[in-house]
Image (spheres, rainbow, N blue to C red):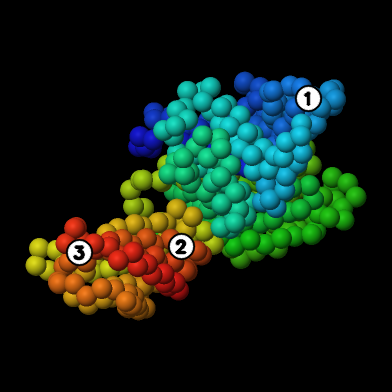
Amino acid sequence: MKQEKEVIGIDLGNEYALISYYKPGMETPETVSMLPGSENYLFPVELYRSSGEEEWLFGEQAAKAAKQGNGICYKHLPGKAYEDESIQFAAKKIDFVELLGIFLDRLIGMAVRAGVNRTESVVSVTVKQLDFDKAGVLWKALELAGIRQKQVRLLDYKESFFYFVRSQTQDRWLHDVVLFLLEGKKLEEYYWKRNDRTFPQTVTIEQKDFDGLNHVANDTQKDLAFQEIIDKEFQGKIISTAYLVGTEFESGWLEQSLISLCRQRKAYVGKNLFTKGACFGGMEKNGPEKAMIYVGASAMKINLTMKIHIGGKFEEVSLINAGDNCYESYCACDVLLDEEPYIDICKRNMQGKEEKISSLELTGLPKRPRKATKVHMQLIPVSDTQVKIMIEDRGLGELFPSSGKKWEFLLF
């Protein structure tokens, strides 16, 4: 695994968080344990502070202090930050995004203790579900934790699963791959399927929810109910590997279901798949092109290109790439116009087909000689299929000053 950047991978849930890190020379990311030498990976997403005290306690220390002390313990920080909630503490209003920032600062500090450089590493955060509103909250919280946005990579669980599987040896993903996530009695399946007839190869992950474990009375019934789900879901399918994620799978009730799960395939049980997947995903940042890409909610579904005149001939340059994470896809460039007051943008689908040309007309642009107008263009995704394009007239030097005009377009 050739990767120069250090990476911190965080699995941020509403109740617990896990953190892994990668440093050059390591074979695989290492997950941080609260107790060295153990697999106690779950950090409670909690902060505690006593009246009159200046220091915040976090994680397990916060949970323990809440049981013994007379201060206040704040829980479910991500969910409350997403809802833009705030609290009153010592006559001061504190937004939950600030509390989330404090928690992330302390959590990242655990990786820093292991020798990771806070300011230079890629910080890859995965959450179960992600959208642009949540992304905004996470960017702000990480900024409060001293992490610059250019360091950040945001993923949902499915994309983390994709990166984790792709990092494994080929025998584990030669055919389909399945992951079961069990939280309490809520069982979810992520089904990883690869299409090897395209280039790059594309991977889709389908999610399915089950309620078969909601009404069981004991572990024996739970085991049989899970076995029934496995037998039904796997029938007629070729599955290379199955993963079980969640502490609920580690309580000793897997017997008959485990036999069905391991029939002609490998199976693994653990808690830290998503945090390691976030690390592997972080390794992709600024990395080389891959022959396999994920096609999911967080992946751009369109390619945007523009033809420019270089050395006497036209060349096509890429602006937005299909398959890239839509929360990171961003392009800014200066364009020197020829004569016409418009810019042509070419849009194609993920396979590079279904071409469509959009002419962005710069209405009211001052008339100037050829190549005497420079415009600044920014492309910012607002969804996986929509890109906002902002253009500003910059003029050209003192002879042709900027008019200050701006234009905004939405391509979809």
Q: Few, some or many C-alpha atoms within 10 Å of disc 2 (few <14, some 14-19, many ≥20)?
A: many
> How far is mark 2 from mark 1, CA to CA?
43 Å
| Quadrant showing the N terminus | top left
Q: Give coordinates of residue 353: x percent, y percent.
A: 35, 75
Position of residue 405 relative to residue 243, above or below, is below
Residue 30 in the figure: left or right of residue 258: left
Which image quadrant is residue 250 in?
top right
Question: Looking at the image, which residue sits at the far left?
Answer: 312
Q: Few, some or many C-alpha atoms within 10 Å of disc 3 (few <14, some 14-19, many ≥20)?
A: some
Q: Which label is found at residue 50?
A: 1
* x 51%, y 42%: residue: 124
Q: Earlier in the sequence, mark 2 or mark 1?
A: 1
Is label 1 in contact with label 3 (beta carbons under 8 Å)? Answer: no
* x 30%, y 58%: residue: 333
Which image quadrant is residue 321 in?
bottom left
Q: Give coordinates of residue 324: x percent, y percent.
A: 42, 57
Residue 172 in the figure: left or right of residue 242: left
| Quadrant showing the C terminus | bottom left
Q: Which label is found at residue 159?
A: none
Query: In the structure shown, which secondary structural element does the residue marked by tag 2 occupy?
Result: strand
Residue under circle 2? 381
Residue under circle 3? 400
Q: Amino acid at mark 3?
A: Phe
Q: Few, some or many C-alpha atoms within 10 Å of disc 1 (few <14, some 14-19, many ≥20)?
A: some
Image depth: mark 3 or mark 2 in front: 3
